[in-house]
Image (cartoon, rainbow, N blue to C red):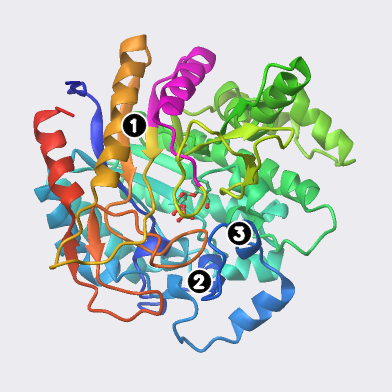
Amino acid sequence: MKKINNDILLGCSISANQAEGAFDVNGKGLSIAELRRYNPDLDRKDINTERKMTKEKLQEALEDDGTYVYPKKFGVDFYNRYKEDVELIANMKNDCFRTSIAWTRIFPNGDETEPNLKGLEFYDNLIDELVKNKIEPIITISHYEMPYNLVEKYGGWKNPLIIDFYLNFAKTVLERYKDKVKYWIPFNEINAANYSVWAGAGLRDDEHPQILGLSMIALNNIFIANAKTIKLGRKINSNFKFGSMVATMLSYYENTDPQLVLKAEKDQQLKIYSFFDVLHRGEYPKYTLNLFKKFDLDLKLSEEDKKIMKENTCDFVGFSYYMSGVVTENEGGLTEGNLAKTGKNKYLKENDWGWQIDPIGLRILMNRLWDRYQKPLFILENGIGYDETLLNNKVEDDYRIEYIKAHLEQLQSAVEDGVECIGYTAWSLMDIISHGTSEMTKRYGFIYVDQDNFGNGTKKRIPKKSYEWFKKVCETREL
Ligand code: P53
């Protein structure tokens, strides 16, 4: 039986926009997440159509009067139940807990100069509650939740003016929680700016025929904001630890044809390394610069910004890992999966959403990232979505136990390979609104939440079988 090293932080992860709800309380402004609808006719594997934001969809969303079509307005009521939820975390004996701060609670429109104190109060209370219970808070500053006003008025992250608005927000929270929070992640899944342009960059998918080009411009601004946040943060508290956060889509080659191997290597450069390289080496790799050229884009990076990027890289390599894919010539067929269509891997099983389960992939990836950056890793998200129902007031989620156990075993193996690892936060603490599909029935939690896709239910929290299992792991370190 494997044991997880004692010094690896274990805990769970959520985000503000998927859990809190209370979208119009205490001066909160509208965020871009709240404009993503739930579609009951949803094709579970066609997440890539679902996540696209168009002019029509946006118009419809803006006319919404608060009915339950836009589930991220309501979340799972974490805003009102945070005390009970923190108690559940404490009872699960977790070392840490990762969540984000809703930008729109603090700067409702994003361009104010002074923060909304009522909004800060919620995080004062939440963080105090965590600290009181000896749970290390891991804070994502921006998790797909930018104020909609910044999109409408300024065009989202493609506009460099957003950098200063973001910095104002970041500074407010870094200063306020400087003695309580050590681990900060400036941007969730920073690569979302390229593959999920609405969530990651506040861009509409139909606003430009070459949306990838536009998103590169946005991403450049996000990278600058990331580096400037670290620079600022180090002045506020030199003990802060800043993390990168990239959604890692590990890809294998389908066969040994060197052409395909090369294609897969290029795929990994573009999907993984191009982001981590900027965040950890402080400069763009050549192949990203080539992309700027290909799109005929003017990379607006002043000498001063270049210097700031070079001097302010992240302290730890943070990432989410859910599945792996295959670069294919379409021999084995495709699975819609998530970030993009990917080849099916005959050695792996997938869940109902086409996500291929691959614990060994985590070990492979951890070794690669350690070899390349030589900085400690933090697995910030890892978990599995299932459509679950209560049976006799219980959820016997053995498949989740199996999934998390297998990944933790591989994590520990990677550590034995020589990889340094700070922690692991499972996605997610409780069932929350799915990011990609805005449904409730894609459940990831150790805790069941009594709520359906239309917002019906008591919202009662019911620990699943996996909750007791993970508690034991945290207590004994035994898998
Ligand atoms: P949902 C793609 C691939 C891996 C992780 O996702 C991803 C995405 C984006 O869809 O997102 C992260 O709920 C994200 C969370 C999200 C979680 O993975 O679409 O940081 O907000 O909920 C799971 O199944």
The region drawn magenta spans: 355-378
C-alpha distance separating marks 1 and 3 = 26 Å
Instruction: Work out whether 452 lies above or below 274.
Output: below
C-alpha distance separating marks 3 and 2 = 20 Å
* Residue that carries the numbered disc 2 in the rendered image: 34
Residue 377 painted magenta:
yes
Locate residue 312, reporting x and y percent: 54, 28
Instruction: Work out whether 381 lies above or below 390.
Output: above
Mark found first going from the N terminus, 1 or 3? 3
Closer to us: 79 or 448 = 448
* Residue that carries the numbered disc 1 in the rendered image: 407
Closer to us: 183 or 207 = 207
Mark found first going from the N terminus, 3 or 2? 2
Please state if 100 lies on the left or on the right of 274 as rendered.
left
Question: Which label sits in the foreground, 1 or 2?
Answer: 1
Quadrant the C terminus occupies: top left
Locate residue 166, reporting x and y percent: 55, 53
Residue at the image point whose x is 39% and y is 67% from the top: 440
Amino acid marked by disc 2: Glu
Q: Using a 10 Å C-alpha cutoff, classify the residue at mark 1 as few (fewer than 14 neighbours), some (14 to 19) or many (20 or more).
A: many
Locate residue 424, reporting x and y percent: 31, 34
Instruction: Work out whether 417 lies above or below 233.
Output: above
